[in-house]
Each structure stands twice: as C-alpha cells, then as structure tokens.
Image (tube, helix red, strand yellow):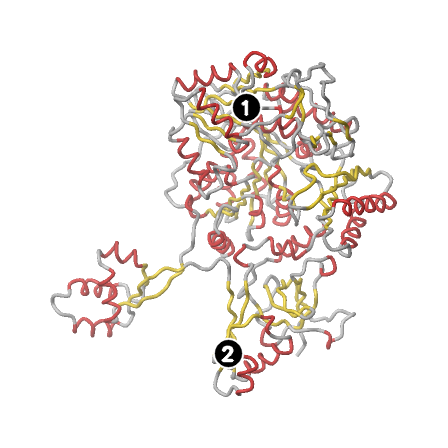
Amino acid sequence: MKQSYAQVVVDVPTQQTNRPYTYLIPSELADQVRPGVRVLVAFGHRSVLGYVVNLTEELPADLKEEQVKDVLTVLDEKPVLSKELLTLAHDLAESNFSYWVSFLALMLPTALKADYRKKLTALEGLSDEDRVTYLDGQQERLVKTKNFTAKGWRAIRELQKEGQLAVVPVIENKGKVKTVLAYQTNADHEALEAIQEQLGKGAKQQQRLLDFAMAHPGQTFSKQEWLSQLDTSVASLNTAVEKGTLKKVQVEVKRRPDSVSGSWVEQEKVLNPEQRAAYDAITTAIVKKKNETFLLEGITGSGKTEVYLQAAQEAINRGEQVLFLVPEIALTPQMQKRVQDRFGDKTALLHSGLSAGERYDEWRRIREGKVQVVVGARSAVFAPLDKLGLIIVDEEHEASYSQSENPHYSARDVALWRGAYHHAPVVLGSATPSLESRARAQKGVYQLLTLTARANPAASLPKVDIVDMRQELLDRGDTNFSQELLDKLKEHLGRGEQAVLMLNRRGFSSFVMCRDCGYVPRDPNCNLAMTLHMDTRTLKCHYCDYQEAIPQVCPACGSRRIRYYGTGTEKVEAELKELLPEYAVIRLDQDTTRKKGAMAKALADFGKKKAQILLGTQMVAKGLDFPDVTLVGVLNADTGLGLPDFRASEKTFQLLTQVAGRAGRAEQQGEVVIQTFNPDHYVLKFAQNHDYEGFYRQEMQIRHAAEFPPYFYTIQIQCSDLDESKVALQTAKIAAWLKKRLPEDVLVLGPSPRSIAKMQGRYFFQMILKMKKPNEADELLRDLVDRSQKAEKGFRLEVRRDPVSFM
C-alpha cells in the first residue's frame, strides 16, 4: 500500500518555519488526516500543533523515508479551515511579510487555541511495566503530548492497536460547549405501561408526566420547558426519573449574543431612484456571479444601509451567503440591530465584544451552514462561509479595518480577495470614501455609485456654522463652549430636542498651536504638523526626523500665546454641569464603555431620552440615528488637524462629515456648530458645505505634490528594542543596507523615532519607503525580515504594507 504524507505548517512563527513540513500519515489516522484539520506533530525535541495544508503520496526529493516523522494525533473530527482559507492565509503571509501559521491561527476563534491532552486507560492484558511507563502505575492518566517522545507515542499506538490501552483525545478548550440539564422521556412503551400499572390513584402529577412521555417517546426537553409547559415541579421530575418515566441528560445550548434574540419586524423600504439604480447594479452582479467592486458613495442619511439590506436579500433568495463588515461593532449597535431585525436567526455576529464561548458558538453555527448573514468587525472577514454571494464593507474609509499589530492585514483587501475567489460583488460604502478608493473609482477600477439626497424626503442636510475660538477666548476666557454653541444648546434642548457633542481626541501625540491665530508649526520637508517632545523641549517630524526648538513667539502673528492644546471628556462634562445643570448628560468614552454592554445601554438610555446631551469622543460620530437629535457640536476641530500624519486632513474631514450627519435625520432641521482656532482651513470649509468632491480634488493635489498615497505606495519598517541606543544604531544600519540595494526610484524617509517613541519599555524607530510600483521591494524586504530573525535578543522588526498611519 502506498504511503500518504501530510504537508503541515507548524505552530512555530519564524521565517525558517514559514513553509510546510512533511509528515507520514499512520494507517490508523488515514481517514482523519485531511487538509484544514489541526494535528500534533513532533518538531525538534517537542510536540507542537500544526495545520494540515495538503496531502501527497510523493516524498519531497530532499527527504529520505527514515527522516520523516509520523503525525501523532488529529485534533479535529472535521476540518476547521477550508481550502479557501488555507490559500488566503498563505497569500496574506506573503504580501504582509508575516508567517503563514500566524494567519491560520488568526482565522480561528480563541476557543480553538487550547490545551490538548490524551486520556490513557489501561485495558485487559496491559503489562505492569507498561502501566508504570505510560500510566505512572495508575488505571487512568491524563497526559500532554510533550510527556512522551515520538518513539513513546509510537509504542502507545501499538498498545492501542493490540487492545491493551485505550487512547482518547481530550481537548481542553478555553471556550467550552455550554450544556443545561434536560429530561428525556422513556421510548419503551411497554416499560411506561408497567410504570402506569404501579401508579396510585393520587399520583396525578406522575400520571400527567407519564401521559406526556407516552405521547412524546424518546424526546428531550430542558428543565425550564418541562416546568413551564406542564406546570410541574423539580421534585415531580426527579420522582419520574426514579420511576423510569424520564432520564436526566445534559444537552448543548448555543450561546447567542443578547441582541440577536427578540422579534424582527422591520420591513423593506421603498427605494428612491438613486437607491434603485445602485441596487440594480449590485444585484445584476450577484445574479451573474460577477466579481465587481462597487464604491457606494452616499451622503449621511442617504439610505446606503437599505441598499445593502435589499441587495443582501437578493443574495439570500439565491441560496447564497452575505458578509457584512462594519468598522467597530460596539460603535454601530443600530446597524447591527437593523441587520438582525431584517434577517433574524439567519444572522450571526462575530466581534471582540462577545465572550469566548459566544464567539465559538457563533463560529460553529457559521461553519455548520446554519447562517446566511454574518455581521462583524475586522476579524469577521475570515468567517468560514463557503457560499459567499455578496460582501459589504460599510464605512470603508475607517482605519479600524487595518490591523496594526502583527500579523498586519487590511480587512478591506481581504474582502476583495474573497470576492474574487467566490466570483461575488464587493460593495464599499461611505459618505467620505478613502482617497485610495475614490481614486480607483475615478480610474474605473471600481464602479462608482452615488446617492446625493437623504432617503427621508423631509430631512435635509444640516446647516453648519464655524465658530472662531480665538475671539471667544479673548472675550470669555478659557472655556470649551463658545457663546453660539451655548445659546443653540439652550434653544434646542428647551424645545425638548437632543444634542450630540464631540470632543475630537484622536491619537496620543501632543501638538503646539497659537491660541490667537491658530498657527501649527510644520516641518519644511513634509509639511506635516510636528510632535511636541517635552523631555527635550523640541518639535520633531517623525517622517524625516527634522526638528526645531518649541517657539516662544508665534512666527505667523507674533503672539506669545503659543502652547500645547488638548482637553478631556471628564473636564467638559464637569463644565456642562455648571453651565446647563438642568440637562442630563451621557458620556461615552473608553472609561465609560469598558464594561460589556455599557455602550449599548448608554445609547438605549439616550434613545429613551433619559438624557438630553450625548457627550463623547469619536464614538458618537458613527452609525447613530436618533430622530430627536437636531444639534451637533464639535468642541475642538483642530486636534485631528494638528497630528503628525499625512492623512490628518482626510481623517478630520471624514470625522466632521460623519458627526455632522447625526443631526436632523428626521423632519426637524438639524444644526451643526464646529469650534476651531483655524476657521479658514480648507478642511473646515469643505466640511461646512458637505462638499466631499471639492475636498477630494484639493487633497489629491496636496498628496501629488508631497508624493504620498494614492500616488505612491508606502511601506513602514518599524524597529524596536529595550535599549534605545541599540535600536537607533541597528535601524541606521538597516537603512544603509536598504539604500544600497533598493531601486533608485524608491525613496527612503528616516530613520527617525516613531511619534510614540517609547511604549511598554520598548523604544521605537521607523523608516518609510515610498515607491511607484506596489511590489518592487518585496523580495528585498522578505530577505530583511529573514535576516532580522538572527538579530540580538530583544530586537524586533516589523514591515507594514500601506499603513493607515505612521504614528
């Protein structure tokens, strides 16, 4: 009989192990080893987890049969990863300079990152010597794989074959299957009749239970169902167990996120002509199974969600599945509810807000094919769907779709990969698309669909006022509230309406700004805001390493009022209570939403009008739809503009447009007040007029002149170490090594300290590569990552493709 071999990616994330290893499949495991299952294999002097990625009958030319080790055991009854996900993990590792095994592990729920053990039980005929060797002299023993060498496991399998030892794998998952007590009726009719003959006339409860058991032979119901349906007691159920009418059993209960339960009532809405045109284009691609990417650009409140939902219904009607990505599920509870209301139990949720058990059970429902729509944040893009007919990426411009920690990836790019694999359309939706996506639509790479009017004919875009805080500070002293915003708050709240106030507190970096003219110091090379370093009393650019002293006098207007700018939500809440004590405030920030369910509860309370003012960070800008919100106030539009990031203007425009869109979504006219020290900044002018197209044209000119994306592709190389001088020296050496080998047209910026130069005791330096072709440095960078494995202990190197931020 011909030998079979498994190609296994082992769970050792290094560049040297970033390939499959060949293992022999023992005959007794031949039916269990398949691509996509997890196995235990010997690697070096230890046993490690591995993922089977392929089967072969051919031994690689560089291997001899005696060198090949056996697969020790199989951990899954059926594959946990499909052929598609195995291929996707490989491609992502290649394009993101990472490890195949890191992406394979990322695709599985935490519950499958487990401790694996074997229960060894002595059977008749086991010698005393073997009992001591393998069972420690006991009848039964729970062992880890590392307790025995590969030779030891081979001997154990022989004893198992001979019927002297029972070997049962025990998977100690972090997320265990949840069970509840249930009672099963006796299926033996004759036995039930015998019990009936022995019942006394007064045993009415037992007679009712017996009658029910006879009518439902062999059926199982939870304890709660017995108690509620038959109006019985636990004591009566236990008596029925003693008599043999019922039997106690444990049954699995799938854990579901709270918000899934309940009735779903939302009906389809009638689409307006623009929505209908978008719907027709998307559904035509669904019907034709055509992989086409649509950019759905629609102003806030234009009804993008309704287009998504009706297109999703078309895919479901055709027996296909829908993947619906949202930037952060905790921030979009209303979107989550709308999808669930429309599709009910056909919906599964995947996001970090779920417990490990809930996530595991939702993942299993998807894998078992019991789900037609998956709603989730970034990691849901790896959901085990095998009949994808439509992928939706809502708010496609959001930075949260990119994972900054290792392994790095963009969920938007993964969605496009999976759309191509399944021949399914991908819809990227946003009121303010990323410049990269909008540029691709302009070139015809994506098909542009536009919604220019609000879906509710009675709702118009809110009127936006810009308030110059320079004058306010002169007139009223240091305050977070201009007189105009205070007056409008009193006016709107006095009419029983509600207000949303946003404190734009993005990022960690401090910056310097003149309180009189709004001037922010920028470096002459990159024209980006510089970061304040109080330790050295300098301003630095973290792209090109330009630095200068903190100015004492504003070079633009001569004022001495040039200083660090920033405030916090707690401080603003306290000021609100002094200024408007009669109105309740709900505060949304990382401190108040840390507890599970806190965000949803706070928004539900605001919806019930338990508070008139919702105060928060960027959380309040996205996905909220409250009909009584007629006023939005942005307390400090400058914070985002002052960050040392080439995307600072784009992110600020997107955020202001998003938060402004929360106002006046029903019949009442909405108003927006944006407070700023830079009232003439082009970002604020375009946001005031809800003019995305104007902003896009202006920002593209700036990006072209500065040679930034989307005109250039970028790669960030980040180095860190516990020793600052070591990492500085090593990064300089890497820069010199790269410059000698990179093509002439690739520009290297840096090295320089990262904006957040020290974190958790590690010092960070970075370099930026700018290039015209996306992959021209790939081979050299893979070589660099490979070489970094041999660096001194403590040194780490990461390479990020197209990072969303360089901070």
Residue at horizontal 59%, vertical 58%? 81
Disc assigned to residue 208: none
Image quarter hosting the C terminus:
top right
Marks 1 and 2, how far apart in space? 68 Å
Disc assigned to residue 166: 2
Kindly identify which residue carries mark 1.
Answer: 634
Check disc 2: other Cα within 10 Å, few if <14, some if 14-19, many if 20+. some
The type of residue carrying mark 1 is Val
Q: At numbered mark 1, what does the secondary structure look like: helix, strand or loop?
A: strand
- Which residue is more in the foreground, 721 or 354? 721
- Which residue is more in the foreground, 275 or 330? 330
Above/below status of 654 relative to 322: above
Image quarter hosting the N terminus:
bottom right
Check disc 1: other Cα within 10 Å, few if <14, some if 14-19, many if 20+. many
In the figure, residue 11 lies in which quadrant?
A: bottom right
Counting from the top left corner in percent of width and height, residue 207 is at 18, 65
Residue at horizontal 52%, vertical 19%? 481
